[in-house]
């Protein structure tokens, strides 16, 4: 049973979020992982799909929505917008609009999770008005939304920034030609916002430089299932014929390629043998190529992948790029693996060039990693040594867990609020693969934070809620 609640409660209360932020994983390193694990649904597909349910005039039923703090956060945003969201006994998520009058999302949710911004396009298209807080910066670097706004403006929306909010309204949106290229390439959630808005616009919309990530294709298929007419999914040019209204749908979210790869990397870093099941191997081609080049044996079947190790990884140069390149969401985990690869490796992140906060924490475990300009330069060491470390964001947290699994002695990873945003039961799955890993909730731990900082108070509240990448 996943650690995260699957109840889809109203939201994480501040004290629950604070408890998560103060919880930690205690890892006894050095065990080879061995066995099979099942992968959950993709967070970054499920979130925009849930947001797109705003467009539907009939009930939606979604399968394989992962049990994550981010899903709870978005469910609570949707509820405030008059939408009923609940998890059924069979694990599916039902989403149904009850009241269409609300159009305002507060800063509290967007600050906690940037993906809340994905409601902007659907609100504008279906309710013709939206007030959505600007997400602001983030620990993985600047996260502008100029391309989202440019695309929606091209569809005829009137947009202005007022007191930290995007205030938007439109009569019916109208089809347009929109190019989503920015200085760092295209935008994933920008594509979801503009695509979700264009499906109800009058006429035809052509989006060029659209993101081609599997999560975008999944959202597009979901919209088409509701009655939208989107062509070109999986290519950088989307052609969308606007329709008058969208109906309900039953839809199964794709498996999480980032979770799958993180678990394979856990097998690799412990020199074990791990099978991930329920995956879509095509979505993992760049990761499998790199694992192969790093010396791991891979057995790829239609919906499962087995990784077997014959020693530590060989050094590699990794460049994180948009799909089908190596995902930026795996850059930190690769850095952890390469910290133990004898020789010199380099890691570059072209999507979020500043996403390197994990380096300092990996150094605490004995890794020889440093930032040289925009590259991480890694000299593989023979072994890592356990230490207390802190997750600064979701994928940095995953990298520290992987490093802890391989390190000699005990590693204590804190900042679990980040990990729980995006991994369903990561510690449970690793434990089932043979890892010595134990979660300590705040109520059974005594540490300086618990002693020095009141559980409910402004200091804690900030530290717990600045999670929103
Ligand atoms: N950018 C702009 N202008 C914009 C939007 C983005 O210049 O209007 C730039 C960004 O600064 C960045 C690049 O474009 O340099 C790509 O950003 P993108 O908009 O594609 O990122 P995102 O949509 O905010 C999603 C995922 C991230 C993932 C990135 C890249 C969701 C909810 N989030 O973010 O996932 O890293 O795409 O693949 O889908 C994670 O899961 O840990 C995570 C951070």
Image: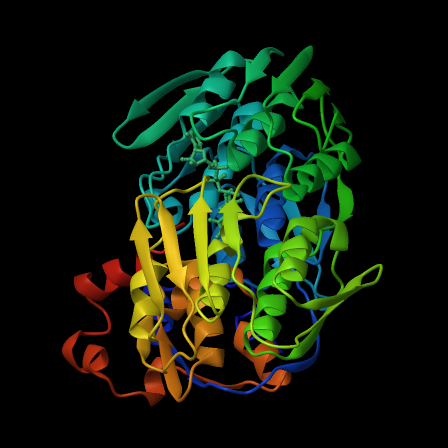
Q: Could one spot residue 425 in this view of the protein? A: no
Q: Residue at left 29%, top 73%?
A: 364
Percent across and percent down for residue 337 are 50, 67
Choose between 150 and 390: the one closer to the eye: 390
Q: Quadrant of residue 97?
A: top right
Choose between 343 and 211: the one closer to the eye: 343
Percent across and percent down for residue 104 are 41, 35
Percent across and percent down for residue 1 are 62, 78
Percent across and percent down for residue 409 are 39, 89
Q: Could one spot residue 81 in this view of the protein? A: yes
- Compared with 423, 318 (above or below) is above
Q: Quadrant of residue 361?
A: bottom left
Q: Quadrant of residue 268?
A: bottom right
Q: Residue at left 36%, top 36%?
A: 133
Residue extending farthest left: 452
Q: Residue at left 46%, top 33%?
A: 103
Counting every numbered tag in the picture gives 0
Choose between 466 and 339: the one closer to the eye: 339
Residue extending farthest right: 302
Q: Residue at left 37%, top 47%?
A: 375
Choose between 304 and 95: the one closer to the eye: 304
């Amino acid at each position: 049973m996943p650690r995260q609640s699957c109840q889809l409660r109203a939201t994480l209360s501040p004290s629950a979020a604070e408890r998560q932020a103060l919880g930690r994983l205690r890892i006894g390193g050095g065990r080879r992982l061995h066995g099979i694990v099942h992968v959950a649904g993709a967070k970054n597909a499920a979130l925009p799909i849930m947001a797109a349910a705003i467009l539907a005039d009939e009930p939606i039923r979604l399968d394989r929505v992962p049990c994550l703090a981010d899903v709870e956060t978005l469910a609570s945003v949707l509820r405030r917008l008059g939408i009923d969201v609940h998890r059924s006994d069979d694990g599916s998520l039902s989403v149904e609009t009850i009241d269409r009058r609300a159009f305002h999302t507060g800063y509290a949710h967007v600050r906690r999770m940037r993906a809340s911004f994905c409601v902007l396009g659907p609100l504008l298209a279906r309710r013709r008005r939206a007030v959505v807080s600007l997400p602001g910066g983030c620990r993985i670097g600047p996260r502008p939304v100029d391309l989202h706004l440019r695309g929606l403006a091209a569809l005829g929306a009137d947009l202005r920034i007022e007191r930290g909010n995007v205030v938007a309204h439109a009569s019916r949106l109208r089809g347009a030609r929109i190019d989503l290229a920015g200085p760092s390439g295209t935008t994933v959630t920008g594509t979801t916002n503009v695509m979700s808005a264009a499906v109800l616009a009058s006429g035809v919309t052509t989006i060029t430089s659209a993101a081609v990530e599997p999560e975008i294709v999944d959202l597009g298929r979901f919209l088409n299932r509701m009655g939208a007419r989107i062509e070109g999914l999986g290519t950088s040019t989307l052609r969308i014929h606007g329709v008058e209204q969208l109906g309900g749908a039953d839809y199964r979210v794709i498996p999480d390629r980032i979770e799958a790869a993180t678990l394979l990397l856990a097998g690799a870093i412990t020199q074990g043998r791990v099978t991930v099941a329920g995956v879509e191997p095509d979505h993992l081609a760049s990761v499998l190529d790199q694992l192969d080049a790093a010396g791991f044996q891979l057995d790829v079947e239609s919906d499962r992948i087995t990784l077997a190790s014959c020693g530590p990884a060989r050094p590699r140069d990794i460049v994180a790029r948009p799909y089908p390149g190596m995902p930026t969401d795996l850059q930190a985990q690769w850095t952890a693996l390469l910290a133990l690869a004898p020789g010199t490796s380099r890691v570059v992140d072209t999507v979020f060039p500043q996403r390197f906060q994990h380096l300092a924490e990996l150094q605490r475990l004995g890794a020889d990693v440093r930032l040289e300009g925009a590259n991480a330069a890694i000299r593989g060491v023979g072994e890592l040594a356990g230490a207390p470390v802190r997750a600064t964001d979701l994928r940095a947290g995953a990298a520290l867990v992987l490093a802890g699994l391989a390190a000699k002695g005990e590693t204590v990873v804190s900042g679990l609020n980040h990990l729980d945003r995006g991994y369903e039961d990561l510690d449970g799955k690793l434990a089932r693969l043979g890892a010595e890993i134990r979660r300590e909730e705040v109520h059974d731990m005594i540490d300086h934070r618990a002693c020095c900082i009141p559980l409910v108070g402004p200091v804690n509240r900030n530290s717990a809620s600045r999670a929103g990448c």
